[in-house]
Amino acid sequence: MGPARWIGWGLTGLFAAFLLIASIGPKMLGARVARDSFAQLGWPEGYVLLVGAIELTGLAFYLFPRTSVLGAVLLTGLLGGAIATHLRAESPLFSHTLFGVYLGIAMWGGLWLRDPVLRSVFPSRPWVT
């Protein structure tokens, strides 16, 4: 396995650990912080577990090589919803609203580095100006 794949799996591991610890875990455990965050953003508390389950499903697909692109697409949709929610709630731009963009870049970057087929579909073109 070449260095790009090692770096890709490292980035994927960091992304997955962050998502599990900071987002999925609190939702699946019904933590007060997750319920309070949903309430602040205008979401009913009843959706906390459902959103956590959707995140966990997307992450499982993302981590399994045969379904990794499907998982990335599903998680991209979820991150887009988070971005839209923060926009509507007028959350701070760089720390909250764009955080989904940062996560998406890490997620797709890790997948691009670890998947040669994806790199062939979306090649790096440093020579293009």
Image (cartoon, rainbow, N blue to C red):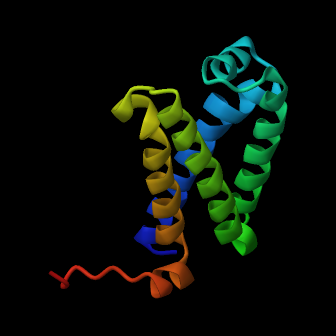
Give the residue furthest to the front. Answer: 88
**Vertical placement of residue 81 versus 96, above or below:** below
**Vertical placement of residue 87 versus 15, above or below:** above
- Number of callouts in the render? 0
Give the residue furthest to the left. Answer: 129
Q: In the shown orientation, is residue 114 left or right of residue 51?
A: left
**Residue at point 45% right, 31% down?**
96
Residue 32, position in %: x, y?
A: 73, 12
Camera-side residue of 113 and 46: 46
Camera-side residue of 121 and 2: 121
Residue 80, position in %: x, y?
A: 56, 50
Residue 2 location, quadrant: bottom left
**Residue at point 65% right, 32% down?**
23
Q: In the shown orientation, is residue 104 left or right of residue 51?
A: left
**Vertical placement of residue 69 versus 102, above or below:** below
Q: In the shown orientation, is residue 127 left or right of residue 95?
A: left
Camera-side residue of 7 and 55: 55
Camera-side residue of 45 and 95: 45
Residue 95 location, quadrant: top left
Where's the C terminus, which quadrant?
bottom left
Residue 44 location, quadrant: top right
Residue 46, position in %: x, y?
A: 85, 26
**Residue at point 69% right, 62% down?**
71
